[in-house]
Image (spheres, rainbow, N blue to C red):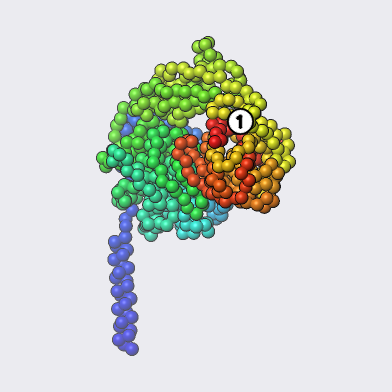
Amino acid sequence: MKNKKISIAGICILFAFFWRVQVVCAREFVHPGGLHTRADLERMKKMVAEGRQPWLEGWKELEKDPLAQYTFKPSPMANMGVSRQKASIDAHAAYLNAIRWYVSGDKAYAKCAIKICNAWSDAVNQVSVARQDLGLVGIPISEFAMAAEVLRVCDLWKKKDFERFKSMMLEYLYPVSRDFLKNHGGTNVDYCWTNWDACNMVALLAIGVLCDREDIYDEGVAYYKYGLGNGSIGNAVPFLHRLDDGTVLGQWQESGRDQAHAQLGVGFLGNVCQIAWNQGDDLFGYDRNRLLAGAEYVARHNQMRGVPFTYYNNSQEMHNRWPAINALGVLGERPVWELIYNHYEVLKGVPAPYCKRMAELLRPEHGSKDHFGYGTLTFTLQPSVYPPLPVPAVPEGLKADASIGKVFLEWKPAAGFTANGYVIQRSEAGKNDFKDIAVYEEKVLNCYTDFRVEAGKRYDYRVAALNKTGRSSFSSSVQACPVEAGGLPAEWRYAEIGQVESGYSGYAKVCGGSFVLAGVHTSFAGERDNVPYIYKEVEGDFVWVARLHGRRGPVSEAGLMVRAALDETAESVTMTLGHAGGRFARMGSRKQAGTERRFAVGNAYTWLPAWFKLTRAGDVFYAYESPDGVNWFYVHSVKIKMPQRIYAGLTVCCREGEKPGQAEFDHVELR
């Protein structure tokens, strides 16, 4: 018995010894050490005081932000989950006022930032999140933690208030981010987007630093490296592509979705790595600079330079087959590039040419709704000439294609990719009185559609490139004459399948054959079709191609249709764009007359213009889609017994409403 007591006592002593060693060896966090260290803050202060560039321009940009004013009034909520957007606004105001205080020394800004933080820590007593914001509430959680880490060095923030703020973080906010990364709202682990995971990873690291909780900080670091969800770096950048010049680009998980969210995720993971770097951990370099490979991919694509793409899918059934054009070339929404460029190329000497150019195009960075922004002020490490780029080159290759009630314009990106916008001008042909019809600012998309035209009137168009330095000369002008829709060609017919209100059709011999088709209260889901239909008869095997380039009014779905008969219950095959959000490309089929139409989803993030193709080989029908009419991707196939002679054409479905929905097609080819 005595030996047993000694044994238990010995175990207790041993446990106490190891516990003591663990406490002694626990991480001592750097403070401030969220997005910025004390050295970073001092650099900003010194450079602005000395009027050095580009910090001074970044500072001037910050001074204009309405959220960076000491008159800002917070709007705290007991439940932060009611509106993560409103919470984020207040978190931004706290951070921006904290930066203004430190750089200027004006305590009015510190008092404002403290007031915001105190108001929220005094109010929050729960975080109940609506399903549509599952995961995204991690944005204001992380932002408040990062803002407070800057503010903690202000002696105006009373200790009891600071402790209450940290208690809010640990009791109410940390569990939300932790549980999301563990459970993903009850969805499959790969269902949620990179940015949903990433903002919560930022939250874990930022809370861990703020509250001196190594365990929480380590959770975030471990998830970045090994997490099962799409926020971990291996899933955020699932494919690596090596270009002919040896450059490695990392395909971003959301690049097939849209470019705004792709840039959003780059910014969040950049924040993760910056916080870790300030604590002595190099996540930037993890897995051979995988974050840089992903950032370079997104940056290059959004400069209109083109990127390779590998088919991507997950449990959302995205079926991404090419990089999305939605928000392509829109630079200003996500000012996240100074952080990436300055760390890799300036600090480490690792080339980051596309991130560098993005930083130069946006410099000085302004604010953003989901990122703090102002990276030119806060992350710049070395002086630079401002503005950083020469006047852009004159755009070349401008061409204008006349269509029904519109003109399509396209040109080559300005040589050197030094433009961060364009000016598009128009004149009535021969008058030389050009006026602006569009100005792209922080947007480098090299195309434009002019809808404000009169059919039969000729127009001259020209384009110039912009950046912070100035505007280029205008390009050579090109001419186009939009047309009105007329009657259908002799071989084409218009029919109303089932019940259709106010249906109409039209045609013009432009853009490879252009059609318009409209109707009210139309649909083809279910056992019966009620749709307007432009068609012609075709016998035997065929290839049927068209580009859907426009939708007006309450269009829910539009595309190609082939039918065994003009009866509303007939066997049929469709290849259309629409469904939820209007972005699902899908093949539909009714194998037997009077049965329900079934669908197979193609690219779930297809944006206009969209090219579709249906082919027949015996009794098998194949559906394809394409972003450009050149590179085609298989969607699905189905075997249906149909007559040799059937109908092939175009259709449109519309949501309920009084106005007709109109679909516009061109480059129509049936062979």
Q: Nearer the viewer, residue 454 or 41?
A: 454
Q: Where is the C terminus found, in terms of image quarters?
A: top right
Q: Residue at x 50, y 11 (%)?
A: 432
Mark 1 Cα within 10 Å, few/some/many (few <14, many 20+)? many
Q: Position of 384 compared to 633: left or right? A: left
The residue carrying mark 1 is 515
Q: Position of 539 compared to 287: left or right? A: right
Q: Residue at x 38, y 37 (%)?
A: 300
Horizontal and vertical percent for residue 59? Answer: 39, 32
Q: Residue furthest left?
A: 349
Q: Position of 570 compared to 542: left or right? A: right
Q: Nearer the viewer, residue 7 or 657?
A: 657
Q: Nearer the viewer, residue 581 or 544?
A: 544
Q: Where is the N terminus found, in terms of image quarters?
A: bottom left
Q: Is residue 68 visible?
A: no
Q: Quadrant of residue 387?
A: top left
Amino acid on which the number 1 mark rests in the picture? Phe
Q: Residue at x 40, y 52 (%)?
A: 235
Q: Residue at x 30, y 86 (%)?
A: 3
When the figure is inspected, residue 539 is found, relative to residue 213, above or below; the finding is above
Q: Residue furthest top?
A: 431
Which secondary structure lies at badge 1? strand
Q: Residue furthest bottom?
A: 1
Q: Nearer the viewer, residue 260 or 42?
A: 260
When the figure is inspected, residue 669 is found, relative to residue 486, above or below; the finding is below
